[in-house]
Image (spheres, rainbow, N blue to C red):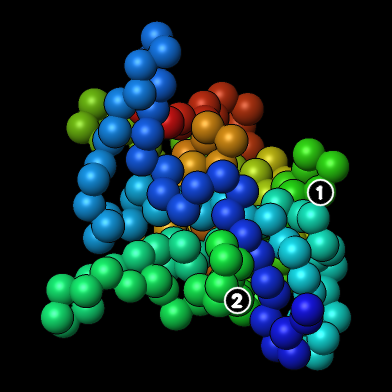
Amino acid sequence: MQSIFNFIIKPKQERYDNKKYIDGTELILNSELADHRYVSRVGIVTALPKSEKTEIKVGDEVIVHHNVFRRFHDAKGIEKNSRSYWKENKYFVTADQIFLYKRNNIWYAPKDYCFIKPIKSNNIIEKEIPLRGIVKYLNKNFNKIKVNDLVGFMPSGEYEFIIDGERLYRVLTKFITIKYERKGNETEYNPSWT
C-alpha cells in the first residue's frame, strides 16, 4: 500500500520513550501522555508517497515530529491516537514532519533542515553559548556552510532533539545568519543527562 502524498512509517520500538534500565531494573520516567519529551520520534519508513520524489527510501530510519506517535485525551477525556495514526502501528507522515533520515548508519538532513551541536560557554551562569553552534548534520542542497562549521542562528528558530545520545538543535537552514571562523578551542556541549 502506498499513499499519494504521505510516507507510511512505523515506530522503531515503542510509541513512547519513557523507560530507562538501571542495573537491570526498569524505571518509568513519565506516565502522562501529554508530555512531548517522552514521545518517541524514531520511526522506520514502510512506504513512500506516490506523488513526491524523495531521497528517503523504504527501510530508512527517520526522526519525526513529536506528535506523530503521540496519544492524547480529547475534551471528553477519551484517549485517542494522533491524526497521523492509520492502523496497526502504521502512521501517515508528510515530508515536512521528517527531520532526519538514516541509511547505512549515517544521518542525513532532508530539504530545509540542519542540526547544530551547542558549544560550551566559559560563563559560570550560562552553560552554553546561545544561538551559536557547530553544524553536525546538513542537507546536501545547502552549500553556503559545511559540516563542522561554527554558525550563528536566529532566536526561536531552534528545537532540541536527542540524536544518538547527543543533544542537538534542529534549525531551518534559512535561519542560519552567520558563519564564524573557528578558533579550534570550541568545546561541544553535551550535558550528562543525555
Q: In the rendering, at what x and y percent does residue 81 appear?
A: 39, 71
Quarter of the N terminus within the rendering: bottom right
Residue that badge 1 annotates:
103
Q: Quadrant of residue 145?
A: bottom right
User: Alpha carbon of mark 1 to alpha carbon of mark 2: how far?
Assistant: 20 Å
Q: Amino acid at mark 1?
A: Arg
Give the camera-side residue of 154 and 87: 87
Task: Give the residue furthest to the front.
Answer: 88
Front label number (1 vs 2): 2
Relative to 25, say whether 7 is above or below. Answer: below
Give the camera-side residue of 14 and 50: 14
Q: How many marks?
A: 2
Crowding at mark 2 (Cα within 10 Å: few <14, some 14-19, many 20+)? many
Residue that badge 2 annotates:
92
For marks 1 and 2, the one nearer the N-term is 2
Q: Residue at x 52, y 27 (%)?
A: 187
Relative to 138, say whether 104 is above or below. Answer: above
Could one spot residue 18 in this view of the protein? yes
